[in-house]
């Protein structure tokens, strides 16, 4: 993960695999970041492999942010993330704007 602060928001970018093999480590790191920042964006643009373990972590982080009265947003969803969220019909559940580029063939608008 790579992190930066921008316009009062803390942005952490997850890169590579967000799956069962890295779930425990990512969960701990993301919960720690959530504890440290009032406003946190999780950038998913460079997630190459995403599975149900990643979905569970995103849902858990969303619930935890609500419980702690913190603002958490998932941004820049990669194709892998969009595909899984769409398959599981969870785009609305996560409540974040999901922008699908016009140049993505076969994607639903």
Image (cartoon, rainbow, N blue to C red):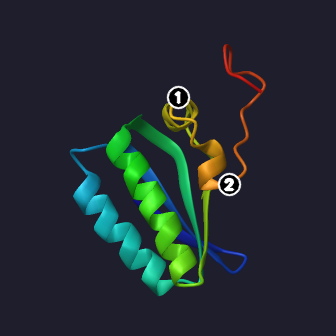
- Which circle's residue, 1 or 2, is located before the other in the chain? 1
Q: Quadrant of residue 70?
A: bottom right
Image coords of residue 17 (percent x, y): 34, 42
81 displayed left or right of 109: left
Q: Does the rendering let one see residue 3?
A: no
Residue named by callout 2: 96
Q: Does the rendering let one see residue 103?
A: yes
Image coords of residue 86 (percent x, y): 58, 32
28 displayed left or right of 13: left
Q: Quick check: marks 1 and 2 in contact, CB under 8 Å? A: no
Residue projecting furthest to the top:
106
Residue named by callout 1: 87
Query: Who is closer to the viewer here, 95 or 76?
Result: 95
Q: Quadrant of residue 32?
A: bottom left
Query: In this picture, is 94 found above or below 99?
Result: below
Image coords of residue 42 (percent x, y): 54, 60
55 displayed left or right of 99: left
Query: Regarding mark 1 in the picture, which secondary structure is present there?
Result: helix
Query: Who is closer to the viewer here, 91 or 10?
Result: 91
Image coords of residue 56 (percent x, y): 39, 52
The residue shown at (52%, 84%) is 68
97 displayed left or right of 51: right
The residue shown at (60%, 51%) is 93
């Amino acid at each position: 993960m790579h992190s930066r602060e921008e316009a009062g928001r803390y942005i952490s970018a997850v890169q590579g695999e967000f799956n069962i093999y890295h779930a425990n480590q990512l969960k701990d790191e993301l919960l720690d970041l959530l504890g440290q920042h009032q406003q946190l964006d999780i950038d998913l643009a460079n997630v190459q492999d995403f599975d149900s373990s990643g979905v569970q972590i995103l849902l858990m982080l969303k619930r935890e942010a609500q419980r702690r009265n913190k603002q958490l947003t998932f941004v820049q969803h990669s194709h892998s993330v969009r595909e899984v969220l769409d398959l599981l019909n969870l785009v609305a559940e996560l409540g974040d704007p999901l922008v699908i580029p016009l140049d993505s063939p076969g994607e639903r608008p």
